[in-house]
Image (tube, helix red, strand yellow):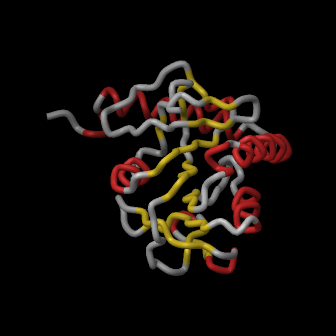
Amino acid sequence: MTDHLSDPVNVRKRSIREAALARRAALSPSERAERSRRIRERLLAHPAVLRASRIFTFVSFDTEVDTHGVIDALLADGRHVAVPRILDDSTIRAVPMTSWDDLEAGRWGILSPRSDTPAAGPFDVAVIPGVGFTEQGGRIGHGRGYYDRWLAENPVETTVALAFECQILPELPLEPHDRPVDVIATEARLLEPGL
């Protein structure tokens, strides 16, 4: 039996993740802020987001596309916003957020809800993170499978990923559990492979 970590697909994914994360980290803070602003504008103008009343979104951390401005805009617009709370090594739960006071530093220093009361679904839109993407909607994350499992258990009308152009790749070694996304918003374009 092949060891999970030495499995050829996992070895390739690990190498792709490291390269994509290095490219993302190479962006200066000002470049990241400006590109995040353009991505936010594309996301908030998307028809699926404009008509959504219940939105699940990740809270950005480190060099990810910044979602703080997205969350501020959604809350100011009166949307029902839920963000992830990590429950254990394999599970996240969508928990309501009404203000930044609802969050505290959680695992890995990521802002997370203080409460673990689940948000009422279903969600119209889920805004999810990732490390690498293809133009066809393929996605790999950090390898823990949190979002793949959450999406498998929580039907969502439209899944949207936020990514910098440097994270869009020609191909990815995807497996059956790697769930594709419907829309990818980058600083340069909007890809809609699942719509």
Closest to the observer, 130 or 81: 81
Left or right: residue 33 versus residue 62 is: right
Total residue callouts: 0
Q: Position of residue 117 (x, y in %)?
A: 45, 79
Left or right: residue 133 versus residue 46 is: left
Closest to the observer, 135 or 119: 119
Q: Is residue 15 above or below residue 42?
A: above
Q: Residue at x 36, y 52 (%)?
A: 149
Q: Position of residue 111 (x, y in %)?
A: 61, 68
Q: Position of residue 128 (x, y in %)?
A: 55, 49
Q: Is residue 47 above or below residue 118?
A: above
Left or right: residue 104 versus residue 120 is: right
Q: Position of residue 142 (x, y in %)?
A: 48, 45
Q: Residue at x 40, y 51 (%)?
A: 151
Left or right: residue 12 versus residue 3 is: right
Q: Residue at x 55, y 65 (%)?
A: 83
Q: Is residue 118 above or below residue 185?
A: below
